[in-house]
Image: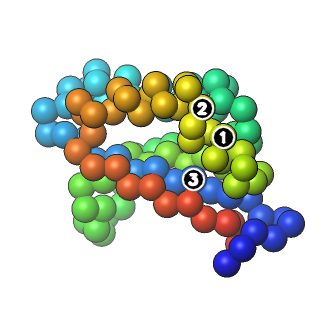
Amino acid sequence: MTQTTQSLLRHVVLFSFKAEASAEQVDAIVIGFGALPQAVPGVVAYEWGTNVSPEGLNAGFTHCFTLTFNSAEDRDAYLVHPNHQAFVEKLGPVIERPLVIDYWAQ
């Protein structure tokens, strides 16, 4: 499906943290991610939260971050922006698995 004139592009990021990651390290990732919308142009909305589903189907993913963009070009500029790249480089020591899904909101 392609973008319509009324669509917003959602960039959803899920993190599964390594078992040895400390609470302080996890908090630093949450704070760092939260700083990106102000540091990188093009983000029109941001939210995050931790899994509270009783279904037990999260496959180890505990944290969800959602950024909203008006266009694929804004998302693409975000992905290569130096502030985003610097944040991504900090993930290695604490992230077990990331999962990223982008979609046009319907």
Label pair 1/2, CB-CB below 8 angstroms: yes
Quadrant holding the C terminus: bottom right
Q: Residues within 10 Å of mark 2 (few under 14, many from 20)?
A: some
- The answer to whether 24 appears left or right of 70 in the picture is left
The disc placed on residue 81 is 2
Which of marks 3 and 2 precedes in the sequence? 3
Q: CA distance from mark 1 to mark 2?
A: 6 Å
Q: Tell me how many marks there are.
A: 3
User: Residue 47 location in percent, x, y?
Assistant: 58, 43
User: Residue 33 location in percent, x, y?
Assistant: 49, 32
At a point 37% along the width and 23% down the height, the residue shown is 28
Q: Is residue 10 above or below residue 41?
A: below
Q: Which residue is mark 3?
A: 11
Q: In which quadrant of the rendered view does residue 22 lie?
A: top left
At a point 28% along the width and 68% down the height, the residue shown is 57
Mark 3: amino acid: His
Q: Which residue is mark 1?
A: 77
Q: Residues within 10 Å of mark 1 (few under 14, many from 20)?
A: some
Q: Is residue 51 above or below residue 4?
A: above
Q: Is residue 101 above or below residue 18?
A: below
Dot 3 falls on a residue whose secondary structure is: strand
At a point 33% along the width and 33% down the height, the residue shown is 91
Q: Residues within 10 Å of mark 3 (few under 14, many from 20)?
A: some
Mark 2: amino acid: His
Dot 1 falls on a residue whose secondary structure is: helix
The disc placed on residue 5 is none
Which of marks 3 and 1 precedes in the sequence? 3
Residues 21 and 86: in front is 86
Q: Is residue 43 above or below residue 101?
A: above
Q: CA distance from mark 2 to mark 3?
A: 15 Å
State whether residue 46 appears in this view. Answer: no
